[in-house]
Every structure is written in structure tokens, then in C-alpha cells.
Image (cartoon, rainbow, N blue to C red):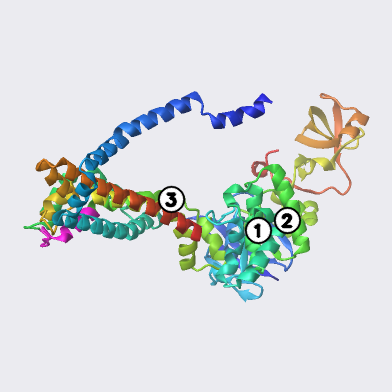
Amino acid sequence: MSIEVRSVSKQFGDFHALDDVSVSLPTGQLTALLGPSGGGKSTLLRIIAGLEDADAGTVEIEGRDATRLPAQQRNVGFVFQHYAAFKHMSVAKNVAFGLEIRKVAKEEVRARVDELLRLVHLEQFADRRPSQLSGGQRQRMALARALAVRPSVLLLDEPFGALDAQVRKELREWLRHLHDEFPVTTVFVTHDQEEALEVADEIVVINAGRVEQVGSPDSLYDAPASAFVMSFLGPVTTLDGALVRPHDVELVAPGHGTGGRVARITRIGFEVRVEVRTAAGRTDLTLTRSAARARGIAVGEQVEVALVAGATSVPAPGAVARELLPAR
Amino acid sequence: MTAVAAPARNRRRPSTPARVGLGVGVLWFSVLALLPLVAVVVETSSAGWAGFLATITDAQTAAALRLTVTQALGVTAVNVVMGTLIAWVLVRDPFPGRRAVEVLIDIPFALPTIVAGLVLLSLYGPGSPLGIDVAATEAAVTLALLFVTLPFVVRTVQPVLAELDADVEQAAASLGASPLTILRRIVAPALAPAVAAGAALSFARALSEYGALVLLSGNLPMRTEVASVRILSYLESGDQTSAAAVATLLLAVSLLAIVALELIGRAAVRRG
């Protein structure tokens, strides 16, 4: 295991940011710490990096107890949400910083900086100031700067959080490819479940200072351990007292499901969302546009709905979980 | 096409409100600052180069100028260190009573300088309740200058320090930089322009100070008399041209210091 966190707790005033958290992050993998804002995921990342001290518990990096090591000696690369660029230095100087501090020979520094700037596609910007770069470029510079010192683990705190949607998408694909090429153990914090599902090998879901579930994107999506994980990882609806995914609900022939009336139909691109009012409440389902057209469906129609075979469901926790449902 | 050309034209020729603003600004600056400065230089030139040299090489005047410039340099050096330190404490180490200190720092700004002079005289003059009497010594000049120039560096550095991103220092730490290296290569270059600006203000103010030191220093010729006092005594004896000559020299020194500090500030940023 590359990073071993054992029973870590952290309190800010009387707020429990982390409450007895233990996780092991395997070497060479890309792991996402996923959860809502204020859930403690950034605090955990900062404790691993040594930027924050844990109140209790231990952190081990590459088999070495790092709990009491200062950030300087952990050999950890850290990328911040807002880039943390050294504004008064050129892009090349930013990347060279960690190497210059280690008193690496000038020639070697230049070669390594060139190599990294090529890797992050910034070679023509070497002499620019960070202020002359776009957000995406600045974040790539920050990544090159963190990688320059050959860290044993790379930690990214909401690395794409400050970027607009298009750049965010590009950068996370790029990060995935970069990791496939250079498999340094990487942990990134995100509150965007799509980002985690798309990029990570493994996801650690953190909520209210505790680990909710650890697993691969598929296992988390298909076998959520709790209503929270289920609702955080994707859209959910209720059917017969269970929390289910709208795309796992289908319209069935009379006598085979739960009866209800179509209350609303919304089409978004290729997808058609249907809201059905049943005796128990409301059930949402999604159809593809062609399926909806083939069947023909109208507001006010009496229909019956049921789960498809092999659908994921967890008991609906009632009013409490409703508040946790991501707005969508 | 016009839509593309418009911004380019805008850049070459400012819009009407901008032109009015520029005009008012230049006029204001000319009437308040440029015109009096030119008048001083013109008055100086009426005695010619020889007259100028004769005035500033006069033993008593030269001594006053030397004292003023060395005191201003020394006081500015102290302010660079102490001002930055105070700004650091105010921003980084919140302590009880911080708000009170915030207000107190500005007192030298707010106090009429002659009142400051009176306060200093009663505290550090003959009959000092503290038992410290520095009246009629060079220390009196230093003390008065330190008092009136205290806020400059503090007030220029403080906002820059407050804006400094904690992330940036943490990024440097995780790259292996020691606290001293972070201070030298990350924090100092970021603060340098503000420190230089504060130092320039402090130096200029020290060169020209009159009210705060005139009571305590005793104005002893060749010993504790500063340039501004010398200017006044020239004026009192009806020698406007000599007064203008001293003023012109102070102006030149001040300008030189401001330019030099600006360059030092920029160099420090580049070096980081």
C-alpha cells in the first residue's frame, strides 16, 4: 500500500472534519476522494500532504510513518484548486523551483523542466508569467511543478474545480492519459461524481467526516452500500419504498407493475424524462427518445411501472435522504 | 468589419469621458504639484550655478543637509525592518488588542506634526517623566523622524501581505522549501514592491519633516539643525534664492531615492 491512513481524526473548533477515518490507497492507482463540500475530503488530503496535522491517528507513505514528518520531507506533489502559482516567476522557473531547492545541477534542471513542459504542452510558454496563462494552462503548470521533484504520491485538491466545464472535461481526460503513461500513485479530491466515475480506478466516498464506501466506480454504482452513496453517484427516484435509478425503471403491461398517472414529460436531448404519480408518491423514469416515440406516451395517461431485471436498489431512507439528493 | 475595428480605435484614442478625466487630472496635478516645483527650480536658477553651489556648500547648510539625508536614510532602513515586522504581526499573528494597535499605528498620520513635537518634547525633553532627556541631540532628530514615518511601511506592506495566498507558501513547502527559503524566494519578492513604496514615502517624509522635530532637536547649527529649519531661516533673513536652492537639492535627492527604491523593488521581484 502506498498510502495507509489509520484512525485519523481532525477537529476544527467543535466541528468534526474527520472522525476516525482509515483508508489504504494502493501504489500506482488513481484514487478519487468523492463527497459533498465540507465532508472532510480536502482535510484528509491535506493531512496526507502534511499541510494539516491530524488530532489523532497515523499516516504512512510508502511504508514510512509520516505522521510527524513536515510537508517538506514527505516527497509529496500537491496541486491546489486555485493553482498557487509563484506569480513573480516565469513558467519555467515555477517548474524548476523544487529542483533548484534540492540543488540539482543546472543542466539537469533545464533538461527536466523542458521534458515536463513538453509533457503538459506548455513548452512555448516557458518564459511567460503565470498571469499570462489561462486557468487550464496554469493548472497544467502546477501539475508539472509538482511532478518535477518525482514525488512518490501526487495529491490534487479539486484540481479542476476553478475551470469552466469544457476545459474541465479536457483536463480530466488528459489527466487519465497522463496517469496511464506515468503511473505515479495519485489521489484527487472532487465533489463531481461524473469526474470521479470517469477518471478514477478507485473511489473513496467521504461524507460528514466518515468513509461511506470504498470501491471501483462500477462496484460503487452497481452496489452502493447506502442510500447516500446511491444518491450521490447518480440520479435516483423512489419506487415502492425503494431508492432506484430512473433508467432502471420501465413502463410495463397492465397488471405487471405499480399503477400511476403521467404527470410530466421533459425531453433533454436524446433522453426523455417521465414523472409518474403513484399511490405511494412520485417515480421518475428515463427513456431514450426512440423508445418514447415507439411507445407513444402522453401527460395524463394511466401507466404501470416496474424495475428492470438486475436493477440496483436500496431501501429508501425517507425524508432525511431527500435533502441529500443532489439537485437535478 | 466595423465591430472588429472599433476596439482598436478605442485603444488609440480614449473615449470622451476618459479624455476629460485625463485633462482634469493633468490640470490638477500641474496646479498643485508641478507649478510650485517649477517655481522653486526657477527661483533657484536666478542665482546661477555658482550661486547654487555657494549656498549648498556653505558650512552650516552643508551640515544641515548631511544630517537630514543621513537621518532620513537611517530612519528609512529602520522602518523597512520594523514596518515589515509590525505588518507581519498585524496580519499573521492575530493577538488580543490587535484592533487597538491598528488604530494607534495611524496616530502619527493624524496628529498635527507640531502637536507630535510637543508630545515628544514633554516625554523626552528636559523634565521627562521617563527620565529620558534627548533634547538638543541627534537622537532627538532620529526619534521625531521615527515617530512620524512609522505608518508608511506598515500601511503599504499590510494589504499586500493580507492578500498573499497561503496556498502559495504551502505549495513551496510541499516542494521541499524550508521556512527560510519560502520567506526569501516566495514572500520577500511578493512584498518587495510594497516595502520599496513604503520606504520611498518614509524617506521623502523624513527629508522634509519640520514640525515634529523642531521643538525637541533644539536646531543647533552644525549639530541638530535639519534642512527644513535651514530653509526657514534663509526665508526669515529674506534670502529666497538660497532657500529655494536647498529645497531644489532636497527635491533632487528625494526623486533619486524614489527612483532607486522603485528599481530595487523591481529587481527583488525578478530575482525571486
Placement of A137 over or under A1, stated as above or below: above
- Classify the position of the C terminus of chain A by image quarter: top right
Q: Which mark is residue B160?
A: 3
Q: Which mark is residue A175?
A: 2
Badge 1 and badge 3 both on one subunit: no
Badge 2 and badge 3 both on one subunit: no
Q: Label 1 vs label 2: CA separation? A: 10 Å
Near mark 3 (Cα within 10 A), the count class, few <14, some 14-19 or many ≥20, is: some
Amino acid type, residue under disc 2 in the picture:
Leu
The reply to whether the C-beta atoms of the residues labelled 1 and 2 are less than 8 Å apart is yes
Question: For the magenta stretch, what is the residue range?
Answer: B129-146
Report in which chain the residue with disc 2 lies: A
Amino acid type, residue under disc 3 in the picture:
Val
Q: Determine whether, in the image, residue B250 is placed left or right of residue A235.
A: left
Q: Label 1 vs label 3: CA separation? A: 26 Å
Tag in front: 2 or 3: 3
Amino acid type, residue under disc 1 in the picture:
Leu
Q: Which mark is residue A143?
A: 1
**Residue situated furthest bottom in the rendering:** A64
The earlier-in-sequence mark between 1 and 2 is 1
Q: Determine whether, in the image, residue B259 is placed left or right of residue A180.
A: left
- Classify the position of the N terminus of chain A by image quarter: bottom right
